[in-house]
Image: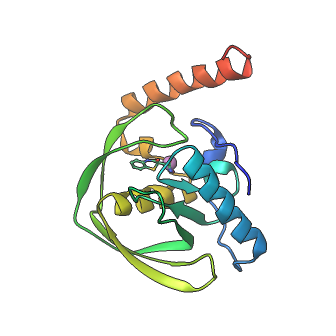
Amino acid sequence: MALLPILHYPDPRLRTHAEPVATVDAPVRQLIDDLLETMYAAPGIGLSATQVNVHKRVIVVDTSEQRNEPHAFVNPVIERADGFQEREEGCLSVPGFFETVKRADHIRVAALGRDGRPFELEAEGLLAVCIQHERDHLDGKLFVDYLSRLKRQRIKSKLKKQGAARSNGQR
Ligand code: GNR
Ligand code: NI
């Protein structure tokens, strides 16, 4: 197991379109385990391979209170999306910013599991939001893309300064 470093907006690598996984082999299972470990340590309720600079279609989520219901999705496809909900979102790649985003309220997702078997899951509420948020990462999309340009620009310039300060050894 390993903790993986998480890319921060506006890193252009977060805009990469991830490639489908051909077979759920040992390296993919290792990636899933590392994503889960990194997500729990952060702590976060979801994480995509994109955020750790691995451009394969793999996401993990756990929205349970006890943090003991890990879900892994390989090549996830949202087959149905119904209704709307608005919820405050954050992102481990956009640290410190939280904004309301409108998304589908009820989804059905099809994917391969950690065991390589196809499965489908129906989700609503926070779990549905989290799966949609992670699925977006695989196409290089971030929750800030749903905000006004003004809000996005403010977030971008603040995070750019923080990133510059970090690489200067100022923080
Ligand atoms: O930890 C996270 N919390 C969260 C809260 C509301 C909506 C989405 C999320 S996902 C986020 C972790 C993350 O950045 N995943 O990509
Ligand atoms: Ni995110």
Residue 68, placed above or below residue 39: below
Q: Position of residue 87 (x, y in %)?
A: 28, 48
Q: Position of residue 41 (x, y in %)?
A: 59, 46
Residue at figure coordinates x 70%, y 70% from the top left: 29
Residue 4, placed above or below residue 160: below
Colouring: rainbow
Q: Residue furthest front?
A: 66
Q: Position of residue 167 (x, y in %)?
A: 73, 22
How many numbered discs, if any? 0
Q: Residue furthest top?
A: 170
Residue 141 versus residue 49: which sits nearer the camera? 49
Would you say residue 84 is visible in this rendering? Answer: yes
Left or right position of 125 against 60:
left
Residue at figure coordinates x 68%, y 73% from the top left: 21
Residue at figure coordinates x 44%, y 81% from the top left: 120
Residue 10, placed above or below residue 41: above
Left or right position of 12 against 65:
right
Q: Position of residue 64 (x, y in %)?
A: 40, 59
Which image quadrant is residue 28 in?
Answer: bottom right
Which image quadrant is residue 13 in?
Answer: top right
Q: Can you say which quadrant of the picture contains the C terminus?
A: top right
Left or right position of 116 against 131:
right
Residue 45 versus residue 104: which sits nearer the camera? 45
